[in-house]
Amino acid sequence: MEKIRDLALLSDILPTAFHGLMEAGAKPGSTVYIAGAGPVGRCGAAAARLLGASCIIVGDHDKDRLALMKRNGCETIDLNEDVPLQDQIEKILGEPMVDCAVDYVGTEAHGIGKDADKEDPAYAINQVIDVTRAGGATGIIGIYGPDPLADSKDEQNGIYPIEFGNAWIKSPKITAGQAPIMHYNYELMQAILWDRMPYLSDMLQTKVIGLDDAPQAYADFDNGSAEKYIIDPHGMIAS
Ligand SMILES: NC(=O)c1ccc[n+]([C@@H]2O[C@H](COP(=O)([O-])OP(=O)(O)OC[C@H]3O[C@@H](n4cnc5c(N)ncnc54)[C@H](O)[C@@H]3O)[C@@H](O)[C@H]2O)c1
């Protein structure tokens, strides 16, 4: 029960995030770009550390979420700055590319710099493809299904402008889809129980709330809160 807040992440976001790293071929010493510092992206950074990645770079527009990453040993890129992602990565690594990159954003992606306020559904996926080195791999955890509420007919039909042609010469490996959660559950549970991810709590800022607090928590999450809420309807954790 002491670790229940971390263990609750096994229900979806931690194995999902871990799967993205598996798709992208992350291994000890890899340089990794994590697109998105939402709860799933933050779990991705935690998973990259568990896997022994060397430099973990996290990009987002949200300063509070990036601050959590920074204080937990990641390099961060503030996408409000009007500097191309490759240039930002070069400033950190000395080269404009990483070994593997994972999209933890999906179709709610925004542009960068002066376009940071604009939704651009294929922006994050194109960025991760763009910054992955030739022969590297890219994981797509963000969701790209048909969006019935979208303005454009293409997006309603699940068609997004992915710049595959620009990447073709790099022999890109791109893997996407729903993560097989149960496949990773046991090992990640053991990693938590044996303190291999002690940084998880600080990265995720998990907060347990009662059912009555859920509407406010949903609203706060929608506004980009840096906390991850766990609803405990029967007060079991408190007791
Ligand atoms: N594949 C699966 O099995 C699976 C499971 C769970 C969640 N997901 C998906 O994972 C994604 C992330 O979930 P979440 O709860 O962390 O979402 P979230 O909305 O809290 O986080 C997304 C973050 O991405 C940032 N962002 C926006 N544009 C960006 C860009 N161009 N580059 C980098 N960051 C950018 C946002 O500021 C935000 O902080 C969603 O699409 C969600 O549906 C997939």
Image (tube, rainbow, N blue to C red):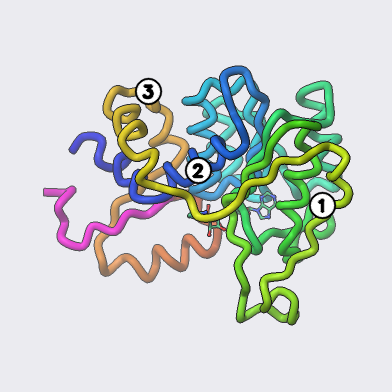
Q: Quadrant of ligand 1?
A: bottom right
Q: Name the N-terminal-most of marks 2 and 1.
A: 2
Residue behind label 2 places its C-beta within 8 angstroms of ligand 1? no
How many numbered circles does the render carry?
A: 3
Q: Most prominent secondary structure in the magenta stretch? A: loop
In the picture of the structure, the residue carrying the numbered disc 2 is 17
Give above or below for 149 relative to 22. below
Q: Which mark is residue 196?
A: 3
Of badges 1 and 3, the one in the foreground is: 1
Residue behind label 1 places its C-beta within 8 angstroms of ligand 1? no
Q: Which residues are magenta?
A: 228-239
Q: Residue at x 16, y 56 (%)?
A: 235
Q: Amino acid at mark 3?
A: Arg
In the picture of the structure, the residue carrying the numbered disc 1 is 164
Q: Amino acid at mark 2?
A: Ala
Q: Name the N-terminal-most of marks 1 and 3.
A: 1
Where is residue 102 shown, x and y percent of the image? 63, 42
Q: Amino acid at mark 1?
A: Phe
Q: Is residue 235 magenta?
A: yes
Of badges 2 and 1, the one in the foreground is: 1
Q: CA distance from mark 1 to mark 3?
A: 37 Å
